[in-house]
Image (tube, grey):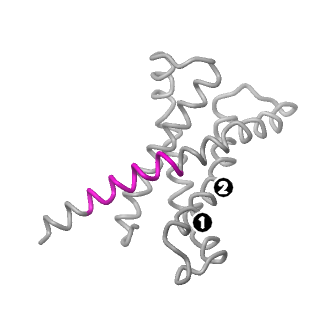
Amino acid sequence: MPQTRGQELFFTAVMVLFMAFGMTLYNDVLSTGIMTMEVFWIALCSFPIVYVIAFVLEFFFIGKLVQKLTFKIIDPSKTQPIFITLVMQGITVMFMCPSMSLVAVLLFTDVNINTFLISWLNAIVLNFAVALFYQVFYASPIVRKIFSLVFKLKNENNK
């Protein structure tokens, strides 16, 4: 989708916005056991730090790794675009979920040397399937639509 560095920056910023807030809210609902406006505001307050960390990880490290791995696994000239997208989404979640689960455990839980590993693994298990489902069926289609609208309008205004 993104063709330029600026488009890549925009796409990543919006995708991380959707994924980081969605997963922050999900984890806060998990920890309280209920969705309320208070839980929504708690998620909104912790979201900025999560967003910055997720953006830096995705834009500077994981995004590049995902592209390399995707095109080692599949040949883009012989693969339908939807399958390329799905592979990229899966690999992204494969790396971002453990990474952001680590961040969340370190920032938002009371762990010590004895509980750290099990807390991190527990977070990965609770987040992985939800992150993949949310990425494939909600965040990605919405962000791709936003991206196409923004860059379609921008291209029309440049004509």
- In the picture, measured across the screen, residue 46 lies left or right of residue 145, that is right
Q: Nearer the viewer, residue 15 or 64?
A: 15
Name which of mark 1 and mark 2 comes first in the sequence. Answer: 1
The residue at the point 63 percent across, 25 percent down is 30
- Is the magenta region chiefly helix, strand or loop? helix
Q: Residue furthest bottom?
A: 77
Which residue corresponds to mark 1? 66
Amino acid type, label 2 = Phe
Judge left or right: residue 116 versus residue 35.
right
User: Residue 23: where, in percent of width, then height?
Assistant: 56, 37
Count all numbered tags in the image, as a single digit. 2
The N terminus sits in image quarter = bottom left
**Which residue is rendered at x = 36% and y = 57% of the image?**
10
Task: Give the camera-side residue of 81 and 11.
Answer: 81
48 in relation to 146, above or below: above
Q: Residues within 10 Å of mark 2 (few under 14, many from 20)?
A: some
Q: Residue 110, percent across and down?
A: 73, 25
Residue 63: x and y, percent?
55, 63
Which numbered marker is on residue 154? Answer: none
Q: Which residue is mark 2?
A: 95
Magenta stretch, residue numbers:
136-151
Q: What residue appears at the point 59 percent right and 81 percent down from the top-left corner?
A: 75
Instruction: Tell me residue 38's x, y (percent).
Output: 48, 15
Q: Is residue 102 left or right of residue 114?
A: left
Q: Residues within 10 Å of mark 1 (few under 14, many from 20)?
A: many
- Is 29 located above or below residue 107 in the figure? above
Identify the amino acid type marked 1: Val
At 69% from the left and 47% from the top, the residue drawn is 98
Q: Are marks 1 and 2 in contact (CB under 8 Å)?
A: yes
